[in-house]
Amino acid sequence: MSDKQGVYRMSFGPWNIDEGADPFGPPVRQPIPLADKMKRAKELGFDGMQFHDDDVVEDLDTKSSQQIEREAGQIKEMLASEGLAAEFVAPRLWFAPETIDGAFTNNDPKCRQYAMDRTKKCIDILRLVDAQYMVLWLAREGTSIREVKSARQQVLMIRDALNELLDYDKDLRILVEPKPNEPVDSAIIPTIGHAIGLGYMTKAPERMGCLVETAHSMLCGLDASDDMGYALAHGKLWSVHLNDQGGLKFDQDKAFGAYNLRHAFNQVRVLEEAGFGQNGEWVGLDVKAMRTQKQDVSWKHLANSRRNFLALVEKVRGLDKNLERQLIAERDYEELDRYILCHLMGLPYKG
Ligand code: 3MF
Ligand code: MG
C-alpha cells in the first residue's frame, strides 16, 4: 500500500461561491472577495482551488504581460499563505464578443485567433500560479443550427488548436471537460468518449486527459460512474467535477449526493477501486449554492458535498467484500441490491 493511498486532495473554484443570478433573475447575494473564498476553502478542509484565467487576472483581455505576471504572482502568494495549491486554470472562452459563435470553431478567423491568444495567456497564468493542468470546457464549440458549421471540420479545428497549444508549452497537460448542451444547443464534444477520442487525435496524446463532471454525464443520459470507469480504463481520468443533478434539466450543479445518493456512492466506488488520486489527481467539486441561500451561509453546499464524499468513501470501504463476492457468485443480485441499500441507509443487514 503506497503512503498516498486513501488520501484525497479536494478542490473547488471561486465560481462555486456565487451571487445567485440565473437567466430569470438578478444576483441575490453580495460578491465575496477571492481572498475570503480561499480562507473559506482552507477552513472547510479543501486543499486547493480551481481557476478560470480571469479569476486569477481580472479583465484579462485588457492586461499587459507585466500586469498578468504581477497579478498572477499575487494570487500565487495568496495561495501559499493559505497553504493551498492551484489544481487547474481554464480559459474562459465563452464570454467575450469574439466567442459568441465559438472559440476554435468560430467561422471568423479573427475570432479564432482571439481564442488562441487568450488560451496562450491562460497557459502563461497556469505556469505563474503553478497549476497542474489546463482544463478545457469547450463551451460554445458547436452549433445552434447544424448548417452553420461542418461537424467534421469542427473536430479538426479543435485538434489543430490543441496541437498548437501542446507545442506552445511542451509540459502542458490538457483535460477536456465535455458537456452535451448549454450554452450551445449541440456541442461537438458532448461525452467523455468524444473527449478521449479527441485527445488521441493530437500530436501528444500522452498529455491529453479528461475530466468527468457528474451533471454533464447525466445531461447525456449517462451514468457518471460508468463514464469515470470508461476514462479510468483509458488511463485518462485526471480530474472530476463531482456534483448532482435532478435528471434531464438545466445544468443544476447540486451538492454531491444530494439528489442521487446511490449514483454518488457508485462514483466514489469506481474512484476508490481504481486508486484515483494516487497519481496526483484531485477530487474537484463543481457545485452551486441554491439561489434561496442567504449570504452568510452561501458556502454550505461545499461543506456538504465534501462531507458527503468522505462519508461515501467510508461506505465504500465499509462494504462487506466477502458478502458482495458471495452474492455475485450466487448471481443473487436482488439480495445484493438489498444489502447495498441497507448499507447506505445504515440499517442492520441480516442475510
Ligand atoms: C460548465 C462547467 C464549467 C467548467 C469550468 C472549468 C463554469 O458547466 O462545468 O464551470 O467546469 O469552466 O472547465
Ligand atoms: Mg465543471
Image (cartoon, grey):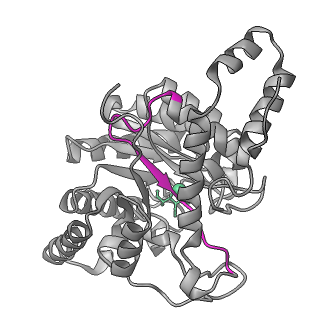
Q: Position of residue 212 (x, y in %)?
A: 54, 44
Residue 277 covered by magenta stretch: yes
Q: Residue at x 63, y 59 (%)?
A: 184
The answer to whether 62 appears left or right of 9 in the picture is left
Q: Which corner quadrant of the image does residue 170 belong to?
A: top left
Q: Position of residue 253 (x, y in %)?
A: 63, 61
Please count the marks in the image: 0
- The vertical placement of 222 against 243, above or below, is above
Nearer to the camera, 317 or 283: 317
* Quadrant in the picture for the C terminus: top right
> Looking at this rendering, what residue extends furthest in the top direction?
329
Q: Residue at x 75, y 33 (%)?
A: 340
**Main secondary structure type of the part rendered in magenta:** loop
* Quadrant in the picture for the N terminus: top left
Nearer to the camera, 223 or 166: 223
Residue 105 covered by magenta stretch: no
> Can residue 206 be seen from the camera position used here?
yes
Q: Residue at x 68, y 78 (%)?
A: 23
Image: magenta residue range: 273-291
Nearer to the camera, 77 or 316: 316
Q: Which corner quadrant of the image does residue 26 belong to?
A: bottom right
> Can residue 139 be seen from the camera position used here?
no
Q: Residue at x 53, y 57 (%)?
A: 306
- The vertical placement of 292 against 318, above or below, is below
- The vertical placement of 28 against 232, above or below, is below
Q: Position of residue 156 (x, y in %)?
A: 46, 39
Nearer to the camera, 349 or 338: 349
Q: Position of residue 164 (x, y in %)?
A: 28, 45
- The vertical placement of 171 against 113, above or below, is above
Q: Which corner quadrant of the image does residue 39 belong to?
A: bottom left
> Looking at this rendering, what residue extends furthest in the left direction?
66
